[in-house]
Image (spheres, rainbow, N blue to C red):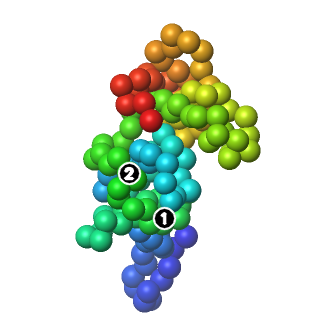
Amino acid sequence: MRTRYSSSVSMPFRPMTPTRLQAKGWARVGRPGAHLLRRGAWYPVVRISSSHIVVLDVNRRNVPVDRRFLEIRYHPPERWSVVRCEAREIQRVGRLFPLTYAVCPACRHRQGFGTDVRDLTCERCKKQASLAWDEMS
């Protein structure tokens, strides 16, 4: 789609929103708190303010989160996040998940896995990567 600004100049129309800018980093929730984000999922950082608020791109929406709840890094995730839940957290979600599951680094899909697994292929996007056992949430 092209928009004409004058009779002699035409430029492509690309709406610019904060979520379409290059990510300033990646963040995930480290501990339960006053937020609605899923543990283990990495979200692009849109903005970091001086008031301890980090704005994340969550499903193409800007969501402010207190920095104290986040783990921030400056490169995209390459390995599956491993999340261990307590039974009461699973009851709160209202769905049945294994007590330990993995989150895909590419599409954030939650997936159960067997014991002694080192690599996992996502059921949704087919990305294959290793499990980040050393970064368990």
Question: Residue at label 2?
Answer: 70
Nearer the N terminus, badge 2 or badge 1?
1
Quadrant (top left/top right/bottom left/bottom right) for the N terminus: bottom right
Question: Residue at label 1?
Answer: 63
Q: Is residue 28 above or below residue 62?
A: above
Callout 2 environment at 10 Å: few (<14), some (14 to 19), or many (20+)?
some
Q: Is residue 71 above or below residue 121?
A: below
Callout 1 environment at 10 Å: few (<14), some (14 to 19), or many (20+)?
some
Instruction: Name the amino acid type tagged 1.
Output: Val
Q: Nearer the viewer, residue 101 or 17?
A: 101
Q: In the orientation shown, which residue stands out farthest toward the top?
A: 116
Where does the image place residue 39, in percent across and percent down from the top left?
51, 43
Instruction: Name the amino acid type tagged 2.
Output: Leu
Where does the image place residue 107, in percent across and percent down from the top left?
54, 41
Q: Nearer the viewer, residue 12 or 137?
A: 137
At mark 2, the secondary structure is strand
